[in-house]
Image (cartoon, coloured by chain):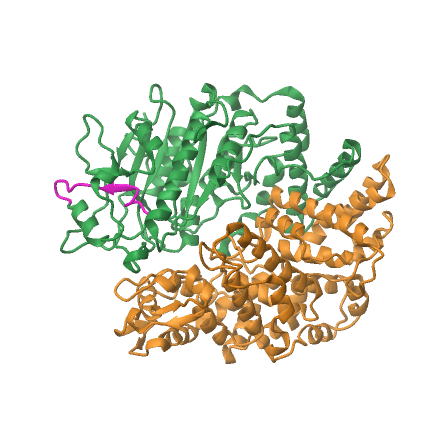
Amino acid sequence: MTEPLSREDVSSILGRVAFGATDVDLDTWTGRTQDELVDHLMAVPADSAMFSAQPDEVKRLSVTAAATSANKNNGRAQLQAAQGWWQERMRTTAWPLLERMTLFWHDHFATGLGQPAPDVAMMLTQNQTLRTHALGNFSELLGAMTVDPAMLHWLDGARSVTGKPNENYGREFLELFTMGVSPQHYSEGDIREAARAFTGWTVNGQRAAAFDARRHDAGVKTVLGRRITDLGAEEYLAVRDAALAMPVTSRFVAWKLVQKLAYDPGKIDVMADGDRLVARVAAKLREAWSIRAAVDVLLRAPEFRHRPAQVARQPVEQAVHACKALGVAADAVQVAQALDGMGQKLFEPPNVGGWPVDEEWLAPGTTLARYRLATWIEAEARRTAGTIDLPVGPRMLPPSDDLAAWAARFGVARFTPNTERTLRGYLASAGKANEAQRQKSVMTLVISSPEWTVM
Amino acid sequence: MTLTRRRFLSSAGGAAGLYLLSPIAARVGRAAGLGVDPATAARRRLVVIGLGGGNDGLNTVIPIADVAGAARASVYRKVRPSIAYRPEQTLPLDRPGDVDHGLGLNASMPYVHGLYKEGRVAIVQGVDYPNHSYSHFTSTDIWHSGEPEQGPQSGWVGRHLDRSGAGEGELRAVGVGYRLPLLLRGEARQGMGLINIPATRFADGAESDEIARARHNALTGFGDHPSSEVLASSVGRGTRATVGLVRELEGTTVPASTGDALADSIITARILLERNLGVETVYLEHPGFDTHTTQRPAQEALLGQLDRALRLFWTGRFGETQVLPELPAGVADRTMVMTISEFGRRIGEAGAAESAGTDHGAASPVFLVGPAAAGSRLVGGLHGEHPNMGTPTLPADDLMMTTDLRRLCSSVLTNWLSDPDPLFRHHAPLPGLFR
């Protein structure tokens, strides 16, 4: 792709995979090529040790066995600290694509807090595992999630035993994590047999996965046509490999990557009339299960730039982008609370299906919570303006009537005529509002605008 | 799963729905005291409560005795050694004159049991659809759409909104929660989602009304010009509808939170139904029924919540507190509550004995709770047949459909909302469910 990127392209691409563009990003990347921008986004170290959690970050969360005990309020404070930590990491990271993909996998392998488990400590361990593999190998990620302590609690693997296997993980493993149901290429029998193979894995007192042979069903199983005989603690890997061998698996995972990062391909038979971009991403993924290679194909595709439809950004992407635009820290409890009002709490997805897509984010509650977030960020920016904390520290608000500066600041290439008219209309009718109130209004309107919400 | 959710917007008509239901002018007019058409006040109302996750029917309507030709209680106790209820732990469902059904109600539902004895509760047994899906997501969509064959396109209440044609300015169907359920999405019209009434306001802090209003007015501008992008248009119209909704609900007083999510949603539903806004259907979500493990305490807590919420709905009482007045006669006389759940659960228990639960199953009972019996169209009691459970030596694995979901939807639409759905023309209303 040598055609230079337009300002709209930069806004849209960074809006979807990097928590939004800044004004500097728009100026830097407009006129350069898609490949150059993708090279930049993909410059995430291959060695995951480079981006493991910083010790001080973990310390700050005080995530210890004692702190995440039964005390419910303490647990709430822990959760907000963990949410804030990740939100701020999304805002300040040098590798936004890595955090965006970690969020993608949190949504794909949607796991949430439970009573009494998984607790915040387990969720943070899972978060780090997701980050380690976010651009790594899907086969390894799938194996790691299958025996992840939070997942073993969340989908009841930890309480599944020989003779009475619990199907919960087996079902979602096939339906949501690997093969999908469009079309369904597995049977109820495959679910039951997979559930038998998964028995024995549990979580020990140190919050680590442990295999207990006495709880494991040692009998022969047949999953997706593959016989599994006496592999003990390795049987989950045999089930994983059986699922990966199914052609529909790479198609389904690719479909989801396209749906969340590019455009919704709609309800299609992913095998028969699959979207062409889905097919290409799937082919790359299937070669060696390299997520990095598959995402690379997706991001460099012409269809990633010139799409049949836009996507609604998730609330957390909007919140982090708004904080980034004004240099306001994203770890405040007010940000997590606004996200709660918008229906997206990190580490607490609505269910194992993950978060909704597109117009489901557009309910009135979401609009109102975003308004609340805007008023908080504006006040916070004003409160902290002037303190020196570059390059991600507070920045002055543009004058209320400099609409081009507002668009740029919020990563919008240019306002649509209707938004321009709406903003000008406001300024003309703002009456007694002083400049600070006008700025607040303009900011609120910008982050309520269609072109900021949908990219 | 999220595979299908875009489709309802794929037509221009679908995109227009939210807008049609909530033009500002109509709302502001009503807020100014113009009132609603008396015809809308006379409509029958429907409150649907979604028991999300798949409620275990067998531990809700519980086999307590074998009956002629069906050793249900024997099978039940055999395959559920850890989680079965004993007969004396249940509330009897037989009423004077009934044949012996050998069934008891979960003891966490004393209020519903009382209404049942009064003849206000219909329990429709064995509800499911052909080629049952065990997926939460697929099956929820089918329960909402009533379309097991073509795949879900729209909700059966949403299509009623389409047919009603009179959506202008109406807040006719409301989903309480973050997501607008498929149930309330039609092809051309859709309901409105709101989280709760106290949160349905703008956070303007200490700003003067005039300063804040100018900003709110400006927000409506995003709905003025549709974009070629479907979603962008949706944002614009949604923002404008939100401003209308906030103004509509401005000044509404709401009791303090009960601390119980379902009870709070019921309070929201009551206020919407009582305020003469034209609200006809309200959908509430009561999640958590996916009881793969430690089912008994979990399900008892959830059914107890449901029972307290229904009591709050009709009596206004929550625990010892009178949170709201009794449901006013004009609303109580014409409101029916219906529970739905994407599936029941399997007959046998799963997992280690100390934490046993049940996996996803097929057919399950539906509860309909109507107005006080005199003059009510709803016929209380058990309806349909209990699904076959096999024999103690050869227990069935799952409960198979005895009542087709489409006939139940057809009944509610035809006999309660007085608006038959052509899609269900081959699925006659259930005989004897309504008078």
Q: Residue at x 58, y 67 (%)?
A: A102
Res. A409 visible in picture: yes
Q: Does residue B57 show up magenta in the picture?
A: yes
Horizontal arrangement in the rendering, residue B383 relative to residue A269 (left or right) = left
Q: Position of residue B74 (x, y in %)?
A: 16, 48
What's the colour of chain A in the image? orange
Q: Nearer the viewer, residue A219 or A417?
A: A219
> From this viewpoint, which residue is outermost toward the front?
A66
Q: Residue at x 55, y 27 (%)?
A: B278
Q: Nearer the viewer, residue A208 or B173?
A: A208
Q: Position of residue A149 (x, y in %)?
A: 45, 66
Vertical order, B237 against A42 (above or below): above
Horizontal arrangement in the rendering, residue A371 relative to residue B21 (left or right) = right
Q: Residue at x 38, y 24 (%)?
A: B371
What's the colour of chain B in the image? green
Q: Position of residue B214 (x, y in %)?
A: 78, 36
Vertical order, B200 against A237 (above or below): above
Magenta region, residue range = B55-70
Q: Quadrant of residue A299?
A: bottom right
Q: Position of residue A437 (x, y in %)?
A: 82, 42
Vertical order, B330 against B264 (above or below): above
Q: Does residue B410 show up magenta in the picture?
A: no
